[in-house]
Every structure is written in structure tokens, then in C-alpha cells.
Amino acid sequence: MACLVPANVFLGLLLLPGTNILSQQDQAKLAATNPLRLVHQRAHSHNDYYQKRPFLDAVKRGFGSVEADVFLHRGRLKVAHTFFEIKTDVTLENLYLKPLSDRIRKNGGFVHRKGIPFRLLIDFKTSGTETLAALEATLEKYREILTRLENGKVIEAAVVIYISGNRPVEEIRSATDRLVFLDGRLSENKRISKTVSPLVSESWNSHFKYRGFGEMPILEQKKLEQILKDVHSQGKIIRFWALPDRPTVWKLAFESGIDLINTDKLDELSSFLSNREQKQLGEKN
């Protein structure tokens, strides 16, 4: 497999491609002097709303990315996995947008470290066009904390929102002013720019049979390496949903350079990443 991504290189991948929230010099300095918990930024809390404390549990563990499924229901954006799970007060704003805003205000302008944006993936379960319109209306009050496009120019901020699921691709792609970005696909990688789609997400099961038992077959290793090369050559980052949620696959993801490690097991992945951090520190010393 590909070699471990150096800390200063990976920190650059954490930033929205095409932006400069931290200078390259500052990125390298941060990674060299204080690498602890940087790797936790690679952790992505899948279906985060199923955790005991949505958003808060992930942030406590240093995760840099969370995901929420959203329905447009009676004019409000409700967080739920299925229509039958919709509840009156379980809204995107209550679970994520308000807590994000509060933490950023109390934490010097960012969720975690200065200059490193936090990712919120929103998986649309209802019509893309209507849900996007309702979302952007809601997001207006949070504009200043959101990385956004204004007059065709990217303005960096503390949070980057990606739209997944029923994605209104052309509406997002054609907008010159917007508060969201697109969760892209490999089939779109070369035709949709990184300023529209800085992130690519794919189903692990659609590409690989490996489930974390024994060694990954050589042909699948080579396929993974090529996918990563293709995505990274466009200045984008990648995650795989349905990634087998076990340490052998986390190790593979970490060492191969998969940018976001998908999990439902927050404690276990956090412990795994902490062990990797300590190993990196030991190797440096």
C-alpha cells in the first residue's frame, strides 16, 4: 500500500482545496510542533445523529467531520434516517447549526484548531431542489461561520457544508453565490471542479470485496491506489461510505491515505487514532 501520509501533507488536505486558511509554512509548523489529535481530523462520524450526543460526542473526540440525514418536512429541516423516525424538535438547526455556532463563538472562531475547517455532510432524503432552497434560507443566519461562494470567489470560514444524497448537482454547480459545496462522485471527478466539489464519496462495497480479514488482495490494493491518485490529482479529498468498521480497515485507510475514515464507532476509532498519534510521536523522538 501507499506510505503513511506525512502530517504536514495531510494537514494541507484537511483544508478546503483551493483555499489558504493556513499558510503552507504555518501548516508545516503546526504539524511539526504539535501533531497530537491532528489525525483525529480524519475521523468522520457517519449517521452522527444516532450518537448519544449528536455533534458533541464527535467534537469531544476531535473528529473533523460529521454527517446528518435530512428531510424537508412541513417546511422544516428534520434530522432522521427514515421518514418514520422524524420528530418535531429534532431539526438540523437544533442538533448541528446552533451547537456549531456556539462552539465557534466560544473557541476563537473555529471548531477545533485555528485555520482548520470542520465538515458537515448533509444527506438530502427529500427532493434536492426544494431541500436546498430551505437549507440555504436557514443557513443565511450562519453565513459568517460558513465557507461559501460569493460572486464566484471562495470565502473561507470555520465550517464547510457538503450536500450528499439527493444532490441538486446543477443548481450547486451553476450558482455563483452559495453557502454549500457538493459531495462528489468518482464519475464526476474530472468534470466538476474542486471549488464545486472538494470532496468525493464512494461506496466501499461498490469497489472492493475486502472486509478487513487477512491481507487486501494485490489487485484491490492497486485499484485503491489509483482511485486515491485520481482524486488527489484534482486537489480533492475522498471518503468511502460502508467502510468496514473495524481496526484492520481503519489501519488500511489511515496508511493508504484515505482522507476521511467513516465510522459509527466513535470511541473505538478515537482510541485507534490516539494510538497512531503516540506511535508517530515515538518514531519522531
Image: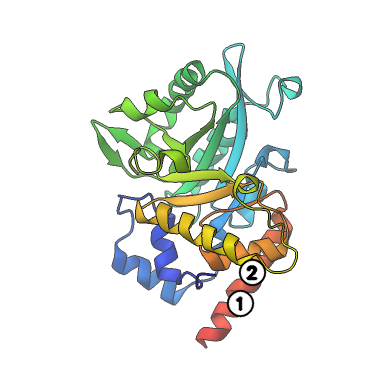
Q: Residue 160: where, in percent of width, then height?
A: 44, 42
Residue depicted at x 55% and y 80%:
281
Residue 243 vertical placement versus 273 (above, below): above
Q: Position of residue 219 (x, y in %)?
A: 58, 62
Residue 113 against residue 84 in the figure, above or below:
below
Q: Which quarter of the picture shows residue 180?
A: top left
| Secondary element at image label 1 | helix
- Number of marks: 2
User: In 3D space, how far apart are the residues under numbered discs 1 and 2 (Cα atoms)?
Assistant: 6 Å
Q: In the image, residue 151 lies at what x, y percent?
A: 23, 30
Which residue type carries mark 1?
Gln
What x and y, as percent, mark residue 239? 54, 50
Q: Is residue 275 above or below residue 149?
A: below
For the point 60% across and 79% down, the residue is 279
Q: Quadrant of residue 137?
A: top left
Task: Name the residue rendered at 65%, 51% in the picture.
Answer: 243
Kind of residue at badge 2: Ser
Tell me the element at label 2: helix
Dividing the picture into quarters, in which one does residue 8 lie? bottom left
At label 1, counting other C-alpha atoms closer than 10 Å, the crowd grade (few under 14, some 14-19, many 20 or more) is some
- Residue farthest to the front, as pictured: 219
Please indicate, yes or no, whether residue 105 appears anywhere in the rendered image: no
Q: Which quadrant: the N terminus?
A: bottom right
Above or below: residue 33 compared with residue 81: below
Q: Say the numbered circle drawn on residue 278.
A: 1
Are the two marked residues, 1 and 2, in contact with CB atoms closer than 8 angstroms? yes
Front one among 242 and 262 = 242
Residue at which label 2 appears = 274
